[in-house]
Image (spheres, grey):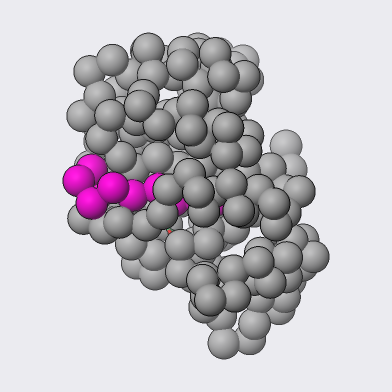
């Protein structure tokens, strides 16, 4: 499977968002990653469906929406209508996660389950047959620009082995602290989709060069 780069705009320059997205698209990123935070599920607030729909107008890339919000069921329709192709929800604090994933599929969107660094990977195994991808957080969610947590590599390896043994059609996405240095580690562990935020949008060498470095 080809390794995909999903560019997270969380730390992009929002005064020039359209241009930043288009530069990343031209440079060759594969997906656009939207981090939705409500100040409750995580200690930060980002943006909502309105900005997501503006992003939809600015790019033809698949949009990968990562919901870090309490009661995600309430917002799945809005983000789906805003143009998300992939929608992921956390296992933590959701007693009806199976239903939440069904709602995403009912909207005809690809569904992902997310696990925080402190959550065992086995906790998502019961919903593995009904997801299109698993997002393994490689930092604690809430902020861009944090350092990669190396203990998460074992989870990627365990999940990758399980998917292979059971011949499941599930992709593995990783999110947080991915740079040119951590990229080979997660890739070798079995990750297929790499979310990259600050390494692309806050790179002193610029967006284009950053993507080139990652792809090279
Ligand atoms: C963290 C977000 C990530 C983050 C990635 O809560 O889910 O998508 O913005 O940014 P970097 O690549 O800077 O860790
Ligand atoms: Zn994210």
From the viewer's side, name the closer residue of 169 and 202.
Answer: 202
Instruction: Give residue 2's quadrant in the image.
Output: top right
Does 210 sit left or right of 175 as displayed? Answer: right
Whole-percent x, y for residue 122 in the image = 32, 24
| Quadrant of the image containing the N terminus | top right
The answer to if 114 sits in the magenta stretch is: no
| Horizontal side, residue 156 vs residue 96: left or right | right
Residue 144 percent coordinates (x, y): 39, 64
What residue lies at 62% left-to-right and 44% top-to-bottom?
63
Find residue 41 and report its image quarter.
Answer: top left
Q: Position of residue 127 (x, y in %)?
A: 41, 15
- Residue 151, how many percent across, how many down? 32, 50
View extreme (front): residue: 50
Query: Magenta includes 35?
Result: yes
Q: Is 41 above or below relative to 134?
A: below
Residue at position x 39%, y 69% in the image: 145
**Magenta stretch bounds:** 33-42
Q: Up-down: is 177 above or below 65?
A: below
Screen quadrant of the C terminus: bottom right
- Left or right: 68 as drawn, with respect to 23: left
| Picture quadrant of residue 207 | bottom right
The extreme bottom residue here reads: 204
């Amino acid at each position: 499977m080809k390794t995909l780069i999903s560019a997270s705009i969380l730390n992009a320059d929002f005064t020039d968002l359209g241009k930043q997205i288009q530069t990343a698209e031209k440079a060759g990123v594969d997906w656009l990653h939207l981090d939705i935070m409500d100040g409750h599920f995580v200690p930060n607030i980002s943006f909502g469906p309105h900005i997501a729909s503006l992003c939809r107008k600015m790019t033809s890339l698949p949009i990968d929406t990562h919901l870090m919000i309490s009661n995600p069921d309430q917002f799945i329709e809005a983000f789906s209508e805003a143009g998300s192709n992939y929608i992921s929800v956390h296992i933590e604090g959701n007693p009806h996660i199976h239903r939440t994933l069904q709602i995403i599929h009912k909207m005809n969107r690809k569904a992902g389950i997310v696990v925080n660094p402190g959550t065992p990977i086995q906790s998502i195994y019961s919903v593995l047959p009904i997801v299109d991808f698993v997002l393994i957080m490689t930092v604690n969610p809430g902020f861009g620009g944090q350092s990669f947590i190396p203990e998460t590599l074992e989870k990627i390896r365990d999940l990758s082995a399980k998917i292979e043994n059971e011949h499941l059609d599930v992709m593995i996405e990783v999110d947080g602290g991915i740079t040119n240095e951590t990229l080979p580690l997660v890739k070798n562990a079995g990750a297929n989709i790499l979310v990259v935020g600050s390494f692309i949008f806050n790179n002193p060498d610029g967006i284009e060069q950053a993507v080139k470095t990652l792809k090279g």
